Image: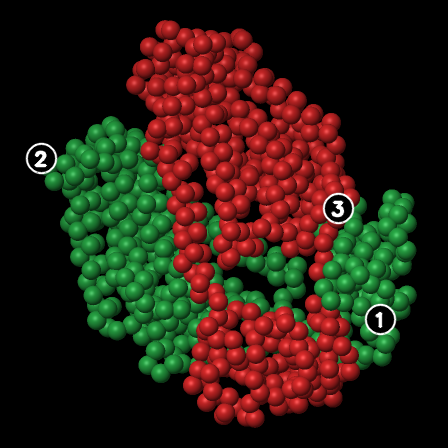
Amino acid sequence: MNNILNVFIYELRRNIIRKGFLFTTFGLPLIAMGIFFLVNQITGGTQGIQERFTELSLDAEGVKRAAYIDLADYFETPQDVPGATAQLIEVDDVATADEMLQKGEIDVYYIISADYMETGAVRLVAPRFSIGSITDIPVQQLLYGKLLDDGMSLDQLLLLANPITVKTTYLERPGESNGADPATNEGTVTLFAVILTLALFGTNGYLMQTIIEEKETRLIEILLSSVRPMQLLVGKIFALGLLGLLQIGVYIGALVLLSSSVNGTEITLPDVPFNLLWWAVVYFVLGYMLFAAFFGMIGAISTSMTDGPNLTIIFVLPAMLPWIFASEFAAEPNGGLAIGMSLFPMTAPMAMVMRLSIINVPIVQIVASVLILSVTIIGVMWLAARLFQVQTLLSGRMPKLREIPKLMFGN
Amino acid sequence: MSKILLIARREYLYNLKRPAFLFAAFGTPVIILSLWLLVFLVLAPQDEPDITEFGYVDLADIISPDLSLPQTISYTFIPFADEASAMRALEAETIGAYFVIPPGYADFDALAAAQENRASLDEVEFGQVQMVSYGDEPDDLIRVFNQFLVWHSSHQFGIDGMVGERISDPVEMIVELKDTGRELSLDALPVLFLLPMFLAVIFWIATQTTSGFLMNGLVEEKKNRIMEIIITTITPMQLLMGKIIGLGLLGLTQMAVWIGLVFVFLILGPQFESLAFLESIPLPFDVILVGIVYFALGYFLSGSILSAIGVLASSEQQSNQYAALVNLPGYLIPLFLLTEFIRDSNSTLSTVLSLIPITAPVSMTIRVGLGAVPLWQIALGVLLLLLTIFVATWGSSKVFRWGLLLYGKKITPREIIQVIRGRAG
């Protein structure tokens, strides 16, 4: 027990100052927040209803002067349109427009096709790729100008130009839903999936990395002279698990900070039902333990950092499977696929949390899945411990697939 | 020459059969692709909505039931006198969802008053509707209902529905770029700078894998003293060239597999109805061609630098760090300056970046995608890369020969420079 504690403290100390860990824990959220603020600055947050129905947004940015060829024969010489910035000139044919483009008299020109009113088809001809000048605003200016000239009111125009705002109320089918807002739960599930992925790739990756590193540097030979392999494995799993939780804590903290400091954007922390949260934590811990054991196994048999990480995808992909089938889950949360995946240990953490977020899963199924998962964890841990022994750890090469059972069970 | 080929063949075949390589080159992309195909095939039939009738309660008096509507409004909307009857129909599942159009939906006076009083979003009914459903309505329902409302509102305002539709969705634009002669729909434009980045990612992965093999191989051979046996029969230069060529081909194999699979995906994908959108993704072949040539040259450049480092590195872990250090700037600098390329792909900075050998692969590929690059610049870039590869290989071979049998010595940069200039050893 004392040895486990020693390993635990040693791993904690060593990994917490690791550059990779510090970067993913603190650097990534900082970068993400930076990008978020930058984007928020550029896009200026969300548009309120006040501005939406007050004026047309007709700033054509990079296009100051543009020509158009009106094959639909619909538009007239453009009049002053409120808010418009581009100056428009009608020309008769492509040759004239090309010439003006060459001389630099216009920035771009538009060819309005003959069936414009039915299809909206317009061809923009620009001299080169440039973000500011690739815009359809001048055509909108033509259209809105023409309609305003024809006597349409600005209010009517604005009502049609802006898509409807829809307030949605979701009903529950009797006995099926768990009563939470589907959008909120989708957020919870996404958050859970991201956190689980990070824990699987990140924390367990470190676990494997430290084992491989110790093998590479032969440090393991010294360690094994004073600690039993099983103690080493358990100490590592707990230490890195704690670091993983710290990392997640920082991420969630950053999210809270973000949601409280940004006004006018629609980031709010999901109001998670307690039941779901509780099971999410249970499944997270169980999932972490299961995959930690798997990664420990890979660490025990790999000899270099080039081979080990490649093998982990065998375990990580199945864990992500339920997320890939998300729409299937949403459509049939009690279908065969959903139930099967929520019982199968490798997919259970993600699958069960997804199901719990949509419906009230029968308690029998939850208990069964937790039981199966726990038994599997014990089994895999035991197997990992069998692999995590002097013979494998000190061997200089990677065992072949058919040698692995022999290593686990002896002769 | 035959010895170089021998080494190249050995490195290629030996590493090709490594589980780690097989998995990275074939396993991962095949798994990812087949998963996606599976998902699309399994879920495709469900995309067809089983219910196409939806209800509405028109409190704004804006719907004219007799108005004839175009085919593009693909759902049937049924009027209900009040919300209670709509709710009953929803509960009986004769309709999939219902909308309530509030009295103030098109009330211009109320809007003016609200704007006067600076009312909040929640207090204004203008342009808003309410939807009630079980959460399983089709994804495009709101878009179609918007179109439905546009036709009816237009009718109310005394204009043709077609005109109304143009107001709400004014332009379906195709962009023609004069300098490159490219023609793209507005939605496909991002492909021009996403494709080079996609290529960059693939090349990055391939380079990391193979340069890892290159350096680890060297470190390993030094560690277990095989190196001493190898160089009794061949010269260090032959060993170096053989390794770079063999592993370079390995990297190219990996990239060919990945790019090939993406092509298969893009070509076969549209056969399935749910993947039809793939057809509209344009594939600018000039970008792919320039990309492959430049990235292949880029690999040989980093390969020749890394082999010198690999022979001096004392552990595999150390060598991996160096590999990232050598390869990173060439990818990071152009990606950080992506906005500059988008702003003007022929500016001085963009041009210089695409000629400097280290940043050339990513930069030139981005530039070719975005604008017309003069042919002489492309040729000059290739020439400069070749020249640098030549110099780097020459320098590396000196370091390589010197460091091949050097064990446990702490090496300073000054010593390396001296070796390259031929004053040590």
Question: Real-space Cα distance between discs 2 and 3?
Answer: 71 Å
Cβ–Cβ below 8 Å for labels 1 and 3? no
Label 3 SS: strand
Total numbered circles: 3
Which disc number belongs to residue A411?
2
Residue B295 in sight: yes
A130 or A36: nearer the eye? A130
Q: The red chain is which one?
A: B
Q: Mark 1 points at which residue?
A: A146
Residue at image position (26%, 32%) is: A398
Residue at image position (34%, 30%) is: B18
Same-chain status of marks 1 and 3 = no
Q: Residue B310 at x, y = what percent? A: 43, 23
A402 or A150: nearer the eye? A150
Q: Mark 2 lies on which chain?
A: A
Which disc number belongs to residue B177?
3
